[in-house]
Amino acid sequence: MQVVYLLLGSNEGDRTGWLQQAIEQVQTTCGTIEKKSAIYETAAWGLEDQPTFLNMALCVQTKLQPLELLQQTRKTEAALGRQRTVKWGQRTLDIDILFYGSEIINHPELTVPHPRLQDRRFALVPLQEIAPQLLHPVFNKTVTQLLEECEDKLPVDRYMAI
């Protein structure tokens, strides 16, 4: 079993509904959800002219290998209406693998830890809620330290507990 951290996001349609369905799918297909953050409403990052996102972090115990986990999260995204047309564009659901244990993975399909985690408050804030002392194996800093040093100032506001 491996402890992994995922970030869920949605900014299209029934955002809360997509996140709830994603949680159910992750529990069914990826492993046991050990912790989940509250949902946060966040400004769009990268491509800012679009609706705000709802984001949340999950801690999951999984038996899946990293590429199997990626494949399963992509299946879940597709099943819930995700269409990959515009980079950083509007979407029903996005699932990012933030950490896979303390492994460092550089594969053409998957980079873990997530390569832009340290630059994104919308990922760090929910992650800090459930794993403040989690150590980033590349930067050798905790999630709390990464959040304190993050230069991203886009708003991240607690939306609701789930």
Image (cartoon, helix red, strand yellow):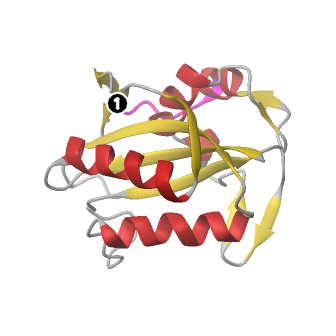
> Which residue is situated farthest in the left direction here?
13
Reply yes or no: does residue 126 show up in magenta. no
Could you tell me which residue is drawn at 29 percent across and 52 percent down? 48
Q: How many marks?
A: 1
Q: In the image, is 11 to the left or to the right of 13?
A: right
- Which residues make up the magenta segment? 149-154
**Residue 53 versus residue 143 in the image, above or below:** below
Q: Residue 92 at what x, y percent from top left?
A: 26, 60
Q: In the image, is 46 to the left or to the right of 113?
A: left
* Numbered disc 1: secondary structure: strand
**Residue 106 versus residue 22 in the image, above or below:** below
- Location of mark 1 (residue): 39
Q: Residue 24 at what x, y percent from top left?
A: 39, 48
Could you tell me which residue is drawn at 30 percent across and 43 percent down? 20
Q: Is residue 45 visible?
A: no
Q: Residue 115 at what x, y percent from top left?
A: 66, 55
**Residue 85 versus residue 65 in the image, above or below:** below
Is 36 or 144 nearer to us in this picture?
36
Instruction: Residue 67: name its quadrant.
Output: bottom right
Q: In the image, is 14 to the left or to the right of 18?
A: left
